[in-house]
Image (cartoon, coloured by chain):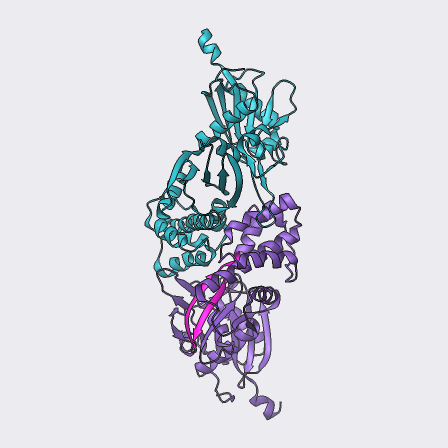
Chain colours: A cyan, B purple
Amino acid sequence: MSPAFASNGPAVAALDWGTTRLRAWLIDGGGKVLAERRGDDGLITAREKGFANVLEGHLVAMGAPETLPVIVCGMAGSRQGWIEAPYVAVPAPLGAILRGAAQVPDPKRDIRIVPGLAQRLAEVPDVMRGEETQLAGAGLPAKGRHLVCMPGTHSKWVVVEDGAVAGFGTWPTGELFSVLAEHSILKHSLGEHPAPVAADNPYFRQWCERALGEGGDVTSRLFAIRAAGLLQDLTSQDAAACLSGLLIGGEIASARRRYGAGDAAVVLIASGSLASLYSAALDLARLAFRAVDADEAVRAGLIEAARENGMIARTGAAI
Amino acid sequence: MSPAFASNGPAVAALDWGTTRLRAWLIDGGGKVLAERRGDDGLITAREKGFANVLEGHLVAMGAPETLPVIVCGMAGSRQGWIEAPYVAVPAPLGAILRGAAQVPDPKRDIRIVPGLAQRLAEVPDVMRGEETQLAGAGLPAKGRHLVCMPGTHSKWVVVEDGAVAGFGTWPTGELFSVLAEHSILKHSLGEHPAPVAADNPYFRQWCERALGEGGDVTSRLFAIRAAGLLQDLTSQDAAACLSGLLIGGEIASARRRYGAGDAAVVLIASGSLASLYSAALDLARLAFRAVDADEAVRAGLIEAARENGMIARTGAAI
């Protein structure tokens, strides 16, 4: 092993540890990814197997040194997780949020978990865990007001002003899709296992466009999907596209109503098919946007958290 | 048995035959109720046992004569029911709808099923079955425009103009409540068996009032119930009241946005706890309304259907 390679050995392990999934990376002092692991041992599994055991398993599999420090974000820091990293109340600067990482008592490693955010407003209380790290890694400009869209099971829309999280909201779009598809009368229209919705499906586009004009009201059109199935012989695939378009269009209309469109382009942090569907929907909404890959954003955010907590140096050399 | 009593014997049997429940009445020629039965043998059960068997069981139990005619409304007339009573397209006069009752082939009885309504609009296709009969029995004035609210699993709002159904919409408020309470992340806030929500619960009123100001957007506040549970130690009973208030307030705001409030009082056709909750919500919305009992309305509608189909006479004497 050459000295040059040794100096680029892992400086920190970074984990995005959610409810059902986990992703882990070994990062060198310059922020370069040396190894990656993905697993289904999220919070639910880790509560059974032990968080330390699950972590060590992944670190060993990646060949991590025994004393390598570890930075974690996500639900592992919730009350039901490993240790609670108490919520930071917004408004809060992104740097301060990352520096609020909670230390896990561990005999050999420096393990820290990035805290989630709490919006303690009587009218719209809200919480997030994990997305704050994506935000920190999204390359947002240090100045100005930026509206960020992070689609998912519980989509988050965040207003970032001059590098601080000013406020945010949650739209449970992904969860509504699953729950309605599986447990509501719409299951008769969507069938047992609806195929993934394509962003160019004309039903997706049509129902999204209609929902965009309704200010976030989606409940008035849900039953119309069932009625269209009865009266217009909608296929199950097209019914799924209707529901997806309705919910995503409704989310965007609602978020725009709450936060306004603003001058700057919306920052869309997403990956895979969600990135395609939301890109199409934002186009239909005539909202300018800049797309950031969600996987890259969370990794960059974890590296930034490692830097803010002094686990790796800003200069790019391991400390 | 005196002749006077005999002349007031049953003239028709009336059934409100839904998906999961059935109610049956014996009615005399003057529209008076002589006997009543309630059962859990709705469409789902009747498909197994046979519709004719279920009907005869209830008729025999009420002592109905062998040739007594029968008028039916509800899902028994759907494609999955006994025989399909094809949808009548709106706009349609209430009298014409009732006269469109489909005849069930039966060797001894005259059995007819009131048709449902279809709104064949590309943008908001919709269907109803059973509510058309409630409408016909709600004592709506023959003239003018009337907005009718019929809360339930799938709440219907109907515009009736000069005695004709002009258009309608469905808000799946009751179904959303159950599905979200049982299958979404809100189950952690609402608990296993949330208690019935009281109309004077302050959380019901507060969340209803907020939703009334949001034009039908409810999805932006769903997750706030979970967050309030985490941040503000909401009890499961109060969380259920939040969800109920949010969904009912959202429904009213959405329906008002679509149909306008109009000059005449809203006609609320409901029974029991739904009548209380919607009365409270309409008060919060400052919408004048007139309440009609849903059980009485459907019975009156079935009697009207029997008259329109010549099964009993208008004059009040059995024919």
Q: Quadrant of residue A214?
A: bottom left
Q: Main secondary structure of the magenta part?
A: strand
- x, y percentage for residue A117? 57, 37
Q: Is residue A306 magenta?
A: no
Q: Is residue B128 visible?
A: no
Q: Is residue B153 visible?
A: yes
Q: Is residue B165 magenta?
A: yes
Comparing B161 with B40, the one in front is B161
Q: Is residue A131 above or below residue B227?
A: above
- x, y percentage for residue B127? 42, 64
Q: Residue at x 57, y 87 (%)?
A: B8
Q: Quadrant of residue A57?
A: top right
Q: Which residues are magenta?
A: B154-175
Comparing B305 with B173, the one in front is B173
- Determine whether, in the image, residue B298 is placed left or right of residue B228: left
- Determine whether, in the image, residue A48 is placed left or right of residue B19: right
Comparing A78 with A45, the one in front is A78
Q: Is residue A110 above or below residue A138?
A: above
Q: Quadrant of residue B291?
A: bottom right
